[in-house]
Amino acid sequence: MDAHPLDSLLVSVIVCTRDCPASLQRALRSILASTYPAFEVTIVDQSERGPSSWLEEVAARESRVCYLHTRERGLSRAYNLGVQRSPGAIFAFTDDDCTVPPAWLASIVAAFASDAEADLLYGQVLAPPEPHGAGDVTPCLKISRPERLSVRDGFKVFGMGANFAVRRRLFARIGLFDEVLGGGGPLRSSQDYDFAYRAYRRGSTILLRPEVIVTHYGTRTKSQWPATLRAYGIGDGGFYLKHVRCRDFQALALLLQRLVSQSARQFAKRVLWRKESDLTYVRYILVGMWQSLHFSVDRETRLYLYPNRQHARSVTQDA
């Protein structure tokens, strides 16, 4: 990577969307305003209503935009299609309910340029400045200082799919995203945790960088939040147990740590702080573990085997 000038590496931005045209327009405008000179955007659209005429028009007049509509469902499938169809040396991922600052891509490229061993990067996901309604929750990810996660530096389950980036060479090494995990898939979430853990187990370095920032407008109301916790729990249970089934004792320790810490937190809320507790997330970790047993695991690739579908294992171009 050091052989390339800092502003010459092509970055492919992947945005997956489904029936959210208004927020997607806001997201796309912010991406196209990026100051980094060498980038293109691939929009993978799984909308029920079929291909979007306005996105087709944007792609026709804007050479940096590639529009793909697919009737297949699932965030991981959309990620995989976007990666396979995009030419970048670096892939930057954000959601259709986020906006990015003009320096977002430049900060990603600079972070990778500063660490030749890094293959994966997570940045901050911040809530918008506008006030929420009472009881509303905006999922966020705050990073107080730069960190490295690796076999040498240590590891923790950490990240958020609304703001991460990957060097192309990592896909060649570990394969693509697990299509059983992730929003819209059978196990609903945690495709990003799984991808990061697979990268770590193959010896890759992961960066946590506070200067790489997006703003997340995906606020959940109080009535919507339990469904979000259920999805998080099911995905996490499926993620952890998959690696336990690969006889990974570190994954088992991480699973037990998550169950104990989350249960203790809710116990403390109820008993010590006299606040309302909620074990929805913990219960659904167990549900996700049970549901994941319906899928076989390829221990070599550490991917669930989706019925009647083969996983793509790599991206042939490297960088």
Image (cartoon, grey):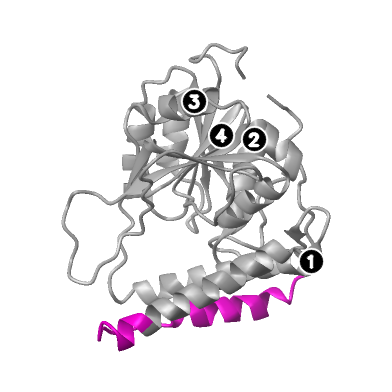
Q: Is residue 186 visible?
A: no
Look at label 4 and name its amino acid: Phe
Residue 109: which numbered mark, if any? 3
Q: How many angstroms separate mark 2 from mark 1 (CA)?
A: 34 Å
- Left or right, 264 with reference to 33: right
- Residue 119 vs 233, above or below: the answer is above
The residue tagged 2 is 85
Instruction: Please state the extent of the stretch shown in magenta in the rendering.
Output: 268-295
Give SS at disc 3: helix
Quadrant location, the C terminus: top right
Tell me which label, 4 or 2, sits earlier in the chain. Answer: 2
Q: Was residue 226 drawn as part of the magenta stretch in this picture?
A: no
Q: Residue at x 51, y 83 (%)?
A: 283
The residue tagged 4 is 91
Residue 247: which numbered mark, if any? 1
Q: Nearer the viewer, mark 1 or mark 3?
A: 1
Residue 158 locus on image (x, y percent): 50, 54
Tell me which label, 1 or 3, sits earlier in the chain. Answer: 3
Residue 276 locus on image (x, y percent): 29, 84
Q: How many angstroms separate mark 1 from mark 3 (CA)?
A: 36 Å
Give SS at disc 2: helix
Q: How many angstroms separate mark 3 from mark 4 (CA)?
A: 10 Å
Looking at the image, which is closer to me, 178 or 276? 276
Give SS at disc 1: loop
Tell me which label, 2 or 1, sits earlier in the chain. Answer: 2
Q: Residue at x 32, y 86 (%)?
A: 270
Q: Residue at x 38, y 44 (%)?
A: 124
Look at label 1 and name its amino acid: Arg
Tell me which label, 3 or 4, sits earlier in the chain. Answer: 4
